[in-house]
Amino acid sequence: MSDTALAIMSLLATIGFYYLSKWAYLYKKVFWLAPILAAPFAVIIFVLAMDIPLDSYFKYTHFLVMMLGPATIAFALPIYQQRKIISRYPITLTLGMITGLTLGLLSSWILVQLFPMPDELANSMLTRSVSTPFAMQATVKFGGIPDLTAMLVLMTGVIGMVICEPVFKMIGVKTSLAKGAALGAASHGSGTAKAYEIGQEEGVIASLTMIFTGVAMVLGAPLFATFL
């Protein structure tokens, strides 16, 4: 099979697996059917089974990554739509952003110190706690690799989505504001999706916290990189 045919097949399979997993998750809401987890897993199996070279896979699928740019700009819409929430809970959102950003960077730095790893992986890990478009932009300032950072962001979000409810019960987090801020700051897109499952207010707070934390990471990355 030609390289072009493999590339087209890869693009169609990636889009198809995403929509299939999305349909399955709407039918039955279990974490392992969530598109952010099921679709990449299916794509990996497909690529390995078909023995598709990575160059062929990324030949056309890189257009999907390019869509992260417009997606980042689109984050301005929920900020405008939820401006009343922002004015109602400024302290919650601010503290959620500061705490999420600080703990995300600090925990990543501690992991890098505890477990020796290649510089590319260590640098790419530092922005894993913010949403993918922001993380891929900020990681360059740390000397990270955007594609590798995207995978680490995915892993972080999925883990947070899976363990959030047991953690909330264990440490006694009960308010919608606290749950939303925690999920948005620590688990970005996956956490926000989980927050909307818990409740509307949790979802809104998570969405705003995720956006503000991501923006703060991008703006502060040149400064953070000088200390880490």
Image (cartoon, rainbow, N blue to C red):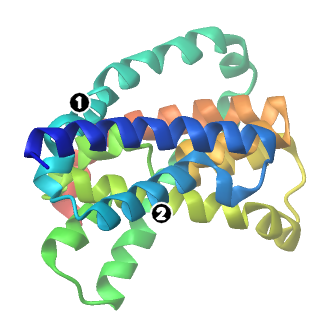
Whether residue 10 is visible, yes or no, is yes
Q: In which quarter of the image is the C terminus?
A: bottom left
- The answer to whether residue 184 is left or right of residue 202 is left
Badge 1 amino acid: Phe
Label 1: which secondary element? helix
Residue 93 lies, with reference to residue 107, above or below; the image says: above
Q: Looking at the image, tell me whether mark 2 or mark 1 is earlier in sequence order.
A: 1
Which is nearer the eye, 67 or 216? Answer: 67
Q: In which quarter of the image is residue 86?
A: top right
Q: Quadrant of residue 4?
A: top left
Residue beneath the point at 47% across and 63% down: 155
Say whether marks 2 and 1 touch (CB < 8 Å).
no
**x and y, in percent, of residue 17 in the image:** 49, 44
**x and y, in percent, of residue 31 in the image:** 70, 57
Residue beneath the point at 22% across and 71% down: 121
Residue 124 lies, with reference to residue 176, above or below; the image says: below
Q: Mark 1 points at which residue?
A: 63
Q: Name the residue under label 2.
A: 155
